[in-house]
Amino acid sequence: MSALAGTLVRLAFKGARVVPRIHDLLGYAATRTRLRLVAADAVVSWPCTLLAPENIRIGPNTSINSGAWLDGQGGITIGANCVASHELLVISTNHNIDAPTALPWDDRLDFRPVTIGDNVWLGARVTILPGTTIGDGAIIGAGSLVNGSIPALAIAAGNPARVIRSRDVAEYETLVRTNRIRLMNRDRLLLGINRFVERFCQ
């Protein structure tokens, strides 16, 4: 029943959605009111942790799976048509260690925005550190630690993430030009309906 409740909540609310389990509806309501910069058809699956969600921008047709931790204190921008697998960790803030006034750190914070382009695929348990930029069409392998800049169309993996190879430029541009974009959240809704039918209509 909780999957059905999550589907109904997605359909009932206009604008950005955090898809909850039924017993998390109060947390959902409190978080959703602060997600003002997220496209109407973007989905962040519950459970998730969003710090400073008012500083998090998520583009249309982007899907972030359950277990995400997004630290928006320094600002996070995620483009259109992106997909992040389970337990994504994005950090945009760090404690000060340069001439600190206390150990292990002092009260000062270092805010550095994270920018993720369009059509990016982030594998499970990817960690993205403050100040990171990931270019359009990049793919980041599961379990990777990303710091610095990943170029557009790069396929990167590891700790720290290194570029393994690049996607085919002509192929990518053709897919974008002909609008061959996977509709992530429509597909998720259809999958949820199919599972509901299989469970309750046997």
Image (cartoon, rainbow, N blue to C red):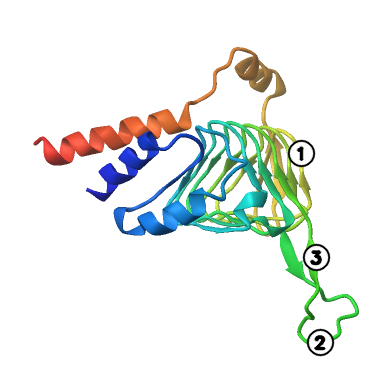
Residue 185 picture location, percent across and down: 44, 33
- In the foreground, 144 or 63: 63
Q: Residues within 10 Å of mark 3 (few under 14, many from 20)?
A: some
Residue 159 picture location, percent across and down: 67, 59
Q: How many marks?
A: 3
Q: Is residue 65 left or right of residue 130?
A: left
- In the foreground, 89 or 167: 89
Residue 104 picture location, percent across and down: 76, 84
Between the C-alphas of marks 1 and 3, the distance is 24 Å
Q: Is residue 116 left or right of residue 19?
A: right
- In the orientation shown, which residue stands out farthest toward the right? 99
- The amino acid sitting under disc 2 is Ala
Q: Nearer the viewer, mark 1 or mark 2?
A: 2
Q: Which residue is mark 2?
A: 102
Which of the two discs, 1 and 3, labels the residue nearer the N terminus?
3
Q: Which residue is mark 3?
A: 110
- Rendered image: mark on residue 151: 1
Between the C-alphas of marks 1 and 2, the distance is 37 Å
In the image, residue 73 above or below residue 185: below
Dot 1: element: loop
- The amino acid sitting under disc 1 is Pro
In the image, residue 147 above or below residue 133: below
Q: Is residue 187 left or right of residue 34?
A: left
- In the foreground, 122 or 27: 27
Dot 2: element: loop
Which of the two discs, 3 and 2, labels the residue nearer the N terminus?
2
What residue appears at the point 39 percent right and 58 percent down from the top-left corner?
26
What residue appears at the point 24 percent right and 38 percent down from the top-left corner?
195
Between the C-alphas of marks 3 and 2, the distance is 15 Å
